[in-house]
Structures are given as C-alpha cells and as structure tokens.
Image: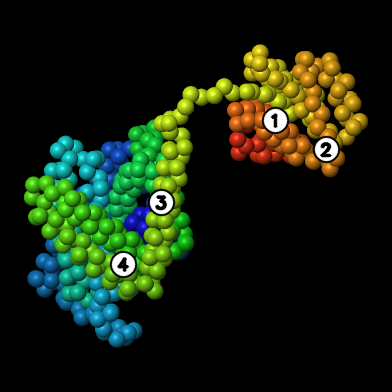
Amino acid sequence: MLTVSVSVAAGVAAVTSAFPQFAPHKVALGVVCVTAVALANIRGVRESGRIFAVPTYFFIVCFGVMILEGFYRLATGSLPRRPPPAIPASEAFTWFLILRAFSSGCTAMTGTEAISNGIPAFRPPESRNAAITLGWMAVILGTFFVGITLLADRLGIVPVAEETVVSQIARRLHGTGLFYYAIQAATALILVLAANTSFADFPRLSSLLARDRYIPRQFATLGERLVFSNGIMVLGAMAALLLVIFGGETHALIPLYAVGVFISFTLSQSGMVRHWWTDRVRGWRHKLAINGLGALATGVVTVVIAATKFTHGAWIVVLVIPALVATFLAMHRHYEDVAEQLSLEGLPGPPELRHTVLVVVGDLHRGVVRAVQYAKTLAAPSVAVRAVFVETDPAKTAKLEEKWARWGLGVPLVILNSPYRSLLRPLVEYLDALQSLGDDHMVTVVIPEFLPSRWWQHILHNQTALLIKGVLLFRKNTVVVDVPYLLKR
C-alpha cells in the first residue's frame, strides 16, 4: 500500500513541477492515478503488462538521452558547472545526519523484490527470464541513480519543495522546451506505473496468505478476468486513503514506506537462510551465505531507518506491523477452529431430527396466506406446522381468530400473551421452550413480509420482519425463512 502511495505521490510531484498550477490538486490527481492503475490491473496481468511496456521504454530512452547529454555538455564545457547554493545548516553535521541521509537513499533499492514475487507471471522458463529481468533492472537502476546524482552535484542542484531534482536538471539542460516536458511526462508515467509492482504482487501474495488462512479467504478468489480482484480493489482503496491522509506529500510517506519495505527484505532473506539450513540441497552453503549476507545488510538498514526516521513517521509502521501480525494470527486461529468444528472426522451417525415449522403472524392478509401455504409444503407427515401470534391488543386477537377460522388453511393458531406489549420476548421464550427438549429439535420460522414497490414507501411501515430476522439470525437450530409478497404500484 505504501509502495503505491509513494510512487503515485512522486509521479504527481513530477507533474506539478512542470505545471505548478496543479499543485493544489495533487491529492485528487494521486487518487485518479491509483484508480487508473487499479482498473488496468483488474483487466488482467498480461494485458496490464502490455499497457505499461510503452511508458517504461519511453522513460528509459528519455532518461538515457538526458544523462548522456548532460555529461557530454559538462565534458565539452557547453554547460558550465555551478557551485551549489549556500544553504544555512539546520543541524550539525553528525553521524546521525549521515545515517538519516543513508536511510532516505535506501528507498531507491525498493521494488527489486517485485520480480522475485512475480516469477509465476513470467514466460517459461520462468526463473531464467526473471533472473535476466532482474539483472537488467539492476544495471538500469544503478546507471540512472548514479548519473542523476553526479549531474545534480556538478550542476549545483539541491532539493526544493516546489520542484523535483529531475525537473531542475532537465530545465537546466533544455529550459522549458519539448524535451523538458517529455522528461517530466516520462518521469510521471514511470513513477505512477511503479505502483503496478504492488498491484501485481500484493494480490498474489495475499492470495497465498488467504490460502494459508492468515487473512480473509476472499483474497484467494479469482475474478472474471482471472486476477485476484479483491486484493487489487483493497490495495487501491487503502493506497488512495493514505494519499488523502498524508496530503500526497512524498516526504511524509517515505519514512513509513522505507521501514516496512526493509523489514520485509530482512524477513524474506532470513526465511531463505532457514530454508537452506533446513533442506540442505546441493550448493546450500553458498546460497545460505548469500541470503545470510542479504539478511544482515537489510537488517542493519532496517535498524538505521527505524532509528533515524522514527520521529518522521516511522513509529506508525513500527506499531502497525506487530498489530497486523497479531491480527493475522487471530484470523488463523479462527479458521483453524472453524475447520476443527466442521470436520467430519469422529462424527457418529447423524441423529434423527425433529422439526417444527412456525409462521409468525401479525395480521391476516394475502401475504400471510401465501406464507402459510409455503410452510405447509415444508412439513412432512411427522412435522408440526403452527402459526404464532403475539397478543398486544385483545380486540385485535378476536378479529384475527375470526378470520383465521376461514383463511388459516387448517393450521392451528398459537396465541402468546404479552402483558408488556413486547413482540420479541414472548416469541423467543416460546422458541426456547420448544428447543429445550433436546439438541435434535430444528425449528423453521417462516416470516411473511409484504414489500412496497417504491423504496421510500418502506419507511411508512413497521420493520417488524427485519427485527425478528435480526434476533433469530444467530440462534442455534433455528432456520429463518422470509416469504416476500410484492405489492404492485
């Protein structure tokens, strides 16, 4: 979720750098971008890959040309070097400041895990193609990162709140010409589309967690386009919410993002160390050493980021992640308990069930007659069918009994007295008395309900049926059947 929100916020920053008039609307722009990427992924992984390929190559070409041109002009003297502006020191130059800068720079390494998480989406041979892609990504990342850093240093460019470093470099090289806007467009597109790594990985990983019963099983359900639609929609909604909460500010989101990412890196590397140590397949020592070094490196980065960025928002993730883990474990215990209680192992032969059908009556009209007819179809020869009426007005009871003799279809009418004019309590007590005779007694409660044709007409009638259904919903050995009678206009 943080990957999506940070990537989109940075992409929108590229847009507002080129068009400052859009700066007040950066949150709305971010939400629109998240929605667009989510919709593209809902259409399917392979289709979204085609959609994102062109902007990716466009970005690589534009950035490569800009870096080569910048170094060429510096080497030929056509772009004079400029010393960085004098900025008053806001704090002493200490090791803590260096570590904080280091922790900010480490965020450039995030995203590399997307390829390892998305290996199943590659063409065969999946692992080989994923390894080639990861190698190319590392080369491109290193080249661009070092190139932009050196250009910024030689051109005397420092970060400012109103404009990104890339925008300043491009503006210095080309002013506000066509290539400048091409660079900004490429930067915005690639940053917004970087959110696609999470949209590709989060639904797949959440489906694995759901399969292992650590998060709601709805995340393991494939949608119509054979993608995990629930994971995509939840990810998009939560990322958009983060953008709204933090005002679309990249610097406010990055501390949360970095801590979460490097904790994940450390856990995954440590998990691989345990895997090699346990399985000990051929070459396991070499692989264990590589993953062990990775776990150590990312673990150090995690500690540094958590310490140096703690007051900048990292404390939120430090608290949220343990809370999430506790939630996942609670869900897992619930699913395990449900599976144990529903298991057929050790189940003796099912006992014979006794069955009583009750029709709840508040008056006698066509809807009630239809419900009584339906109730009689549920009754086997040994099943009792009764109508239940809770008496709150003796005069009304006399009229009902008179009509019931004609239209009751031979079903006996049980009158429950309610001296305090309570409808639900006498009904529940009657059910308790029926079911107190044994655990093998099922009661089906048939509720007649007439439905007005227009939505606003519902407020003109008592919602008695809704109250009864709510009270009886969680009762043991109780089945509630609603028999609607649709009214004409």
Callout in the foreground (4, 1): 1
Q: Are marks 4 and 1 in contact (CB under 8 Å)?
A: no
Q: Where residue 124 appears, x then y in whole percent?
A: 16, 36
Residue located beneath label 2 in the image:
418
- Please give the name of the residue rendered at 79% of the width and 23% of the height, measured from the top-left corner: 413
Residue at 83%, 40% (x, y): give it: 421
Callout 4 environment at 10 Å: few (<14), some (14 to 19), or many (20+)? many
Q: CA distance from mark 3 to mark 1?
A: 40 Å
Q: Quadrant of the C terminus?
A: top right
Q: CA gap, disc 2 to disc 4? A: 74 Å
Residue at mark 1:
434
Which of the 4 quarters of the picture holds residue 325?
bottom left
Instruction: Please tell me whether mark 3 sits on a helix, a strand or a loop.
Output: helix
The residue mark sitting in front, 3 or 1, is: 1
Secondary structure under the numbered disc 4 in the rendered image? loop
Give me the C-alpha separation between circle 3 and circle 2.
Answer: 47 Å
Q: Earlier in the sequence, mark 3 or mark 2?
A: 3
Q: Earlier in the sequence, mark 2 or mark 4?
A: 4
**Dot in front, 3 or 2:** 2
Decide: is 298 above or below 388.
Answer: below
